[in-house]
Amino acid sequence: MKISASIYSDARKDLAQTIAELDAHQVDLLHVDCNDDLAVFDDIVHLRKWTRIPVDLHIITSTPSRFFPLLLEVPVEYVTFQVEPLEEPLVWPKELRAAKGVAITTPTPVDAFDAFSDCDFILIMATVPGQSGGTFNQENFKKIRTFRKRYPHKSIHVDGGVNGEVSFILRNMGVSTAVSGSYLFKGPSIGHALMNLTVRNTASSFRVEDFMIPLEECPKVSFVNCTTRSILETIDVGQLGFCLVTNADGTLKGIVSSADIRKALLHQLRTQEAISPEGMINYQPLTIQASHSVYDLLKMLKRAPFPVMYLPVVSSQNEAVGILNFTNLIKGEL
């Protein structure tokens, strides 16, 4: 996941000093906020003299056409327009070479992107736009899941409340870019904050249940009437590489993943026995409780004797409530 540094959040240094420090730490992008002010391009001209870091421009305006001439004259790598204040159609110039996106605030549903599906990405504002140091609104975890399912080939950017813990969650959810401002500049150093944003953090404000894939969105079968075919079809239709297996009372019976199918096939080749549901199910998967914190999750992953791709989530009574899918951690780093 790329880190886009919100350059105007550093109140302790002038802009040139801020950019020099970000350049020294090789931050991925420079996030430039613009509140309907064409003078922002004067700063972008200076940025081009100081660094080669790509510019990530976020514009809040009712009339985006005002900005198109300068976007062509002073090009940037990423440009985003905020959806809510738009009073005219967003018709991108054909000559524009930047990656194009639209931004939405927390109250705006991801359905708003339908009118801008020619864009390359969405920017989800997880705090109030322009408010530095805000807290990440966890409603946006669901919005990210919804958008990812609806637009699997579009990129997701997130701005607001991104600290080390949130960054880990966003990487796990397949977010490609996170904007960081106050967290990046108010810590002991930019280098220290970047390490937390890209590696780990020990403080926990969120629980597993806040960002897991909930049970209603999981491929699942009931053990009492499942067949080999129903399990394979459920995995195929779900397109997530697994299915959960539950008992009649909703408790977790086990999980079937691609690795479990492979083991069943190898057993069948050795013994010539028919493949049964019982032979595919992993009855003792590693699990985590929904109430556990991100820190608990990281400790579990570190202790695991094998790479964890899927982690079923259960209640304190071992009821299946969801799953964590770690394949997005790999995608998020691309």
Image (spheres, rainbow, N blue to C red):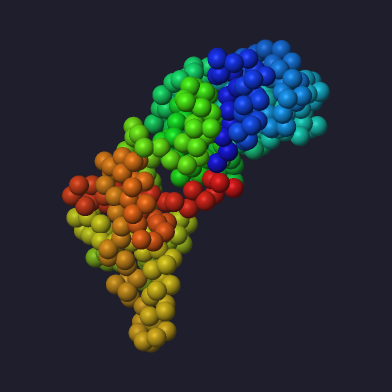
Residue in the image at 80% along x and 32% along y: 95
Percent coordinates x, y for residue 136 in the rendering: 42, 27
In this view, 89 is above or below 100: above
For this view, does 83 lie left or right of residue 146? Answer: right
Q: How many marks?
A: 0
Q: Is residue 289 above or below residue 122?
A: below
Q: Is residue 168 left or right of residue 323?
A: right
Depth order, front residue of 212/301 = 301
Q: Residue at x 71, y 12 (%)?
A: 39
Is residue 322 toward the left or the right of residue 55 in the image? left
> Where residue 255 appears, x then y in whole percent?
33, 61
Residue found 33% across the figure and 54% down from its top: 303
Residue sitting nearer the eye, 120 or 313? 313
Say which quarter of the image contains residue 251: bottom left
Residue 229 visible to the viewer = no
Dividing the picture into quarters, in which one does residue 1 lie?
top right
| Nearer to the camera, 231 or 201 | 201
Q: Is residue 283 left or right of residue 298?
A: left
Provide residue 331's location: percent of width, then percent of height. 54, 49
Q: Position of residue 149 (x, y in %)?
A: 49, 45
Q: Is residue 329 visible?
A: yes
Q: In the depicted view, which residue is nearer to us: 67 or 151? A: 67
